[in-house]
Image (cartoon, coloured by chain):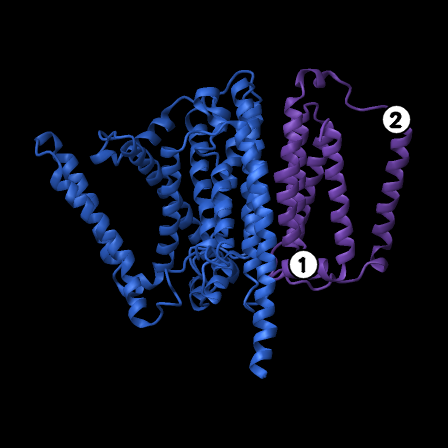
Chain colours: A blue, B purple
Amino acid sequence: MGQIVQYIESYLNTKGLTPGYAGNMFWVVVYIMLVFAGLSVAVIAMNWLERKILAHMQVRLGPMRVGPHGLLQPIADAIKLLLKEDIMPAEADGLVFWMAPLIVVLAAFTVFVVVPFGPEHAITDMNIGILFMLGVSSLSVLGIVMAGWASNSHYPLIGALRSSAQMVSYEVAMGLAVVSAILMTSLNATGTGTLSMIGIVQAQLAQGEWFIFKFFPLGLIAFFIFAVAMVAETNRAPFDLAEAESELTAGFHTEYSGFRWSLFFLAEYSAMIAVSSIAVTLWLGGWLRPFPNLLSGTPWNQIFSLVPGVTFLFFAAICFYNTARMPKHPLFRVQTIGLAGFGAVLGLVGLILFIPPVSMRVQDIFWFSAKVAGFMYLYIWYRGTFPRYRFDQLMQMGWKVLLPMGLGVLLCTGAVGLRSEIWNQVLVPLWQRL
Amino acid sequence: MTPVATPFFFYLLSGIMLIGGILVITRKNPVHSALALIVTLLAQASIYLMLYAPFVAGVQIILYAGGIMVLFLFVIMLVSIDRSMKERQFNSQWVAGLVAATALGGLFIGVYTKGTSIFPEHAPSVVADNNTQEVAKLLYGQYMFAFEIASLLLLVAIIGAVVMAKKRI
């Protein structure tokens, strides 16, 4: 017993290491559970937010009946999906049909092994971090292709073909954008370049600049290429040709229902979160708060450590404001109490976040999640704004616009980086000696 | 972290690879064959990981499992499955097969028996921590010429494919 406690405690003494890197199995399992739970909550929240925000963009109310302002709608949806009959087409290829959603979900969740929520808040840190993320998330294409083929039906097959062609072609542009960001990690004598997710963020800290602003406009262009390619990679509007309702009913998952369909749904949203966290890590400074170098020192650190708590208090205030605006009719009493209770929970979380040890510990997680949440809002915004691309336009965009742009940015980043290295490493010391 | 149960994982992964390989040639349905091949390739990537070569493993997953096999499936799915199910699966050139199998088997047995004297006793100590950086130094330093030649070869292949596929350029 004492040995087990000692084993658990031994990780707490290793400062600045992820549990996977320290090799402590107990904390690895704890972190995996936490990430899995957080991800599920994020998908549920995303489901509600998407319906609500899209509705407001289209001047509708969105879900209003299940819970106050439809807050319980995702849970109702989940229960409906679990209770639905799980149909498998008679002519379908059973094993492949069964395996496809599992592969998609596995690929979508496994990538979170290396996502750095903080310098110590990642399950593990790998030497090949970003390569691992890209590789494993590219496996989800397999699941989609398998789902489309195994359904033994025309719409799913065409949907799967479209989506695999799309994902394979946008992966190229995406890879080039990623490489140009990785090139930047080796600059300013911060050592050799690195593929490790934590190393990439630390390089941005060391260079005192998020990579999106590095070598303006090169970093910005690379980020733009990635931001477009990642929407195509996750098959979201305006690139959601794989599930274009007007042409293909629901694309590759037309024949899926019930729990299997909900697995595809889960995978789609967690893949969105995964690619957003790649973008955040590579270009937006990962877990770093805004201006970590410019506004450093005690007063600023303390001011920024208040932000998580203030954010939650703000959400709580919105809840209380809407509680006050609820209709006063007795039929709405339960909903009003529910909304006030939700606001109270949010406020309590906000107050807990003000306690200094807690806020120091979770600050990095907060900044990372806040940046990812920004991307999630963008996804919804795209869906509300852009009309769907035609398939040939999509391919043209991928191969004739993004790919040459990516190559150009890569070459320019290399050239400019070399110039600045020569300037900093050779010419400046030479001048100082003179 | 020290490796745990290395022999167990090695035999497990090799077993998966072998089963996958056998399934590739025995399945009648080409899609099933391709899926079995993906399983084999993933198990191979895991073996690279066990050999402290994470970079090679990652590249294996991206290129083979994620890229090439998707294109494979892409093509196979468009083939009429019903017709290919009726085709004969094995050809009867057993003489050539026997010669090839004997040669390969002889090579394996030779390596297995003489292996201890041919290969170094211990694997060179490679740290998994900066595997990528070490691979990069070798590729862009010592083996620069071979690396560039290989990429030139690939470029020629790409141009050739475009020339053959397009009627009018």
Name the image quarter holding residue B43. top right
Q: Residue drawn 67% across and 31% down? A: B72
Mark number for residue A356?
none
Q: Secondary structure at mark 1?
A: helix
| Residue A433 left/right relative to B89 | left
Residue B20 x, y percent position in the rendering: 68, 36
Q: Residue drawn 85% across and 42% down? A: B105
Disc 2 crowd rating (10 Å Cα; few below 14, some 14-19, many 20+) is few
- Observer able to see residue A127: no
**Quadrant of the image containing the N terminus of chain A:** bottom left
Identify whether A213 is placed above or below B20.
below
Chain designation of label 1: B
Mark number for residue B136?
1
**Quadrant of the image containing the C terminus of chain A:** bottom right
Between A175 and B135, the residue placed more toward the observer is A175
- Residue that numbered label 2 is attached to: B93
Chain designation of label 2: B
Picture mark count: 2
Identify whether A115 is placed above or below A244.
below
Between A72 and B99, the residue placed more toward the observer is A72
- Observer able to see residue B33: yes
Q: Name which residue type carries label 2.
A: Gln
Q: Name which residue type carries label 1.
A: Ala
Q: Who comes first in sequence, dot 2 or dot 1?
A: 2
